[in-house]
């Protein structure tokens, strides 16, 4: 059975690894902002910002924390000043747009895949942490240069012992085209549910 939705090429990930610490320009609501690639410590914050287990206000608070940690101080200030300007094009939805852009900096994975793997890593953190510790990595939240490296490990664990059908289910959940750009926690929850069974056998 061919893989319907294979992972995208890793060229963008490679380029990001060659330029660690680089500030990337992103555009939202007509503004140019500068952000860095997500760090491993962002795992818990991004999970809280994107799960329907939290209410909308809590998700927005965590979104703000994620942006504070990854936008340059000038860009963060400009973004929030723009939100307070009645003549500005920015809105609370702009924060979600910027979060999407920042979460996918340094990787060719789409937002759905990033958030799905973040959810899986958070729910299976003890197993993931133990696997890395057995490999000599005892502090995974500080050992990796980016969050995406940690998610690489999570994705590998999801598919390494699965059969062809299970791999297809995981990759379909992660990499099928997104229906639209508006952030919807039900999208990421559906993606997580679709491949959650694959995590039951993780060892």
Image: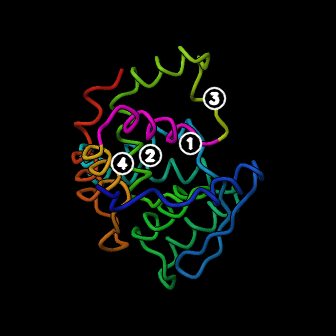
Between marks 1 and 4, how big is the CA–CA gap? 13 Å
Residue 126 x/y as whole percent: 40, 20
Check residue 46 in the rendering and tell me which mark sits there, or answer none. Answer: 2
Q: On the rendered structure, is 56 left or right of 138?
A: left
Reply above or below: 117 against 188: above
Is disc 4 placed on a helix, strand or loop? helix
Range of residues picked out in magenta: 146-163
Residue that badge 3 annotates: 142
N-terminal label among 4 and 2: 2
Between marks 2 and 3, how big is the CA–CA gap? 16 Å
Q: On the rendered structure, is 80 left or right of 169?
A: right
Residue that badge 4 annotates: 116
Q: Nearer the viewer, mark 4 or mark 2?
A: 4
What is the quadrant of residue 203 in the picture?
top left
N-terminal label among 2 and 3: 2
Check residue 147 in the rendering and tell me which mark sits there, or answer none. Answer: 1
Residue 166 x/y as whole percent: 26, 43
Residue 17 x/y as whole percent: 71, 49
Is disc 3 placed on a helix, strand or loop? helix
Reply above or below: 7 against 199: below
N-terminal label among 2 and 1: 2
């Amino acid at each position: 059975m061919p893989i319907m939705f294979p992972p995208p090429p890793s060229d963008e990930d490679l380029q990001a690894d060659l330029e660690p610490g680089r500030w990337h320009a992103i555009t939202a609501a007509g503004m140019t902002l500068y952000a860095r690639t997500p760090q491993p410590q962002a795992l818990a914050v991004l999970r809280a910002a994107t799960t329907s287990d939290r209410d909308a206000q809590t998700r927005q608070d965590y979104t703000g924390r994620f942006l504070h940690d990854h936008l340059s101080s000038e860009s963060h200030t400009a973004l929030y000043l723009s939100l307070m300007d009645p003549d500005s094009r920015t809105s609370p939805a702009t924060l979600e747009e910027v979060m999407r852009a920042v979460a996918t900096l340094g990787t060719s994975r789409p937002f759905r895949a990033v958030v799905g793997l973040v959810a899986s890593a958070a729910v299976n953190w003890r197993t993931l942490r133990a696997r890395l510790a057995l490999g000599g990595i005892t502090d995974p939240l500080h050992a990796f240069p980016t969050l995406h490296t940690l998610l690489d490990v999570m994705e590998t664990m999801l598919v390494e012992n699965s059969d062809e059908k299970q791999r297809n289910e995981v990759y379909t959940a992660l990499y099928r085209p997104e229906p639209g750009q508006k952030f919807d926690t039900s999208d990421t929850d559906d993606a997580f549910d679709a491949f959650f069974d694959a995590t039951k056998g993780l060892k």
